[in-house]
Amino acid sequence: MKVVSSHFLISNIISIFCLIMLPSTSYAARDFSVLIDPGHGGSNDNGTNGTLNGTTYYEDNLNLDYANNLYSKIDNNSSHPFRSFQTRIADVELLNTDRVKMANNVSGTEKDANDDYIPSGGVDIFLSIHCNGGTASNPGTETLYYETSDAGMKLATIVHQFFMKSVRGVFSSANSRWIKYKDITVLHNTVMPAILVETDFMCVQDALEAMITSDYKNAVGTGLNDALLLVDPGFKNYCWGFT
Ligand SMILES: [Zn+2]
């Protein structure tokens, strides 16, 4: 006769209970906050650029389109676990130190570009969106985090995979440069898990051709939003080690 130990039974019961508890429905809508940060902005800081068929496209404008797409996806979903904030919603200059100040909400009275108050103690996640440029022998997308931020690395790991899956749906040859640590002001000085997504290289013609389309912009928003929907359930309580 097969003997099933009580320990085996109890551990299985606990496992089943945990699986039942996993769905994000155990989290209220807007429990968490994300500050979406379209990189660069204003006439003095366009970021990188790329030219296609005689037209030059600038990074700061694309970053804003990507950020707006993500913001709308979160804002339009009333049951979304995140509340979204944006560092800028127009083509205006914004210092990186001011982006950090907004994220951390040290003064306690910081507002985002929509004039919404940042939560006390700062947002839960900082998510900066950029395009890459210059020269690229190995172009593609990458997600950056700060070297000593364990939570940032874990967040980058999750976000990068969802992001890649989504953009490859509209740009099949998109290459992944994976996640990397980098010492950047907005990653170094923010106090919450912070990442910077580099969508692709504007200097690469086929990449730029994809990056300026509404399909690609929507894919960026979709990938990042999908990641945030996954991050929520494990965010503070068990899976990913955030504290
Ligand atoms: Zn940039």
Image (cartoon, rainbow, N blue to C red):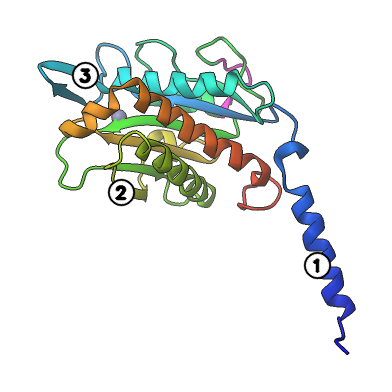
Give the secondary structure at mark 1: helix
Image location (x, y in percent) of residue 72: 52, 18
Residue 67: mark in rendering:
none
Residue nearest the observer in this picture, 188 or 242: 242
Residue located beneath label 2 in the image: 177
Residue nearest the observer in this picture, 84 or 69: 69
Of the residues under marks 2 and 3, which one precedes in the sequence? 3
Image location (x, y in percent) of residue 95: 37, 21
Q: Which residues are magenta?
A: 104-111
Q: Nearer the viewer, mark 2 or mark 1?
A: 1
Q: Which kind of residue does numbered mark 3 sit on?
A: Tyr
In three-dimensional space, the C-alpha distance between marks 1 and 3, rounded to whole angstroms, equals 56 Å
- Please indicate whether residue 78 sits to the left or right of residue 20 in the image: left
Contact, mark 1 vs mark 3 (Cβ under 8 Å): no
As drawn, 100 above or below 188: above
Residue located beneath label 3 in the image: 57
Q: Which kind of residue does numbered mark 2 sit on?
A: Arg
Give the secondary structure at mark 3: strand
Q: Nearer the viewer, mark 1 or mark 3?
A: 1
Residue nearest the observer in this picture, 194 or 166: 166
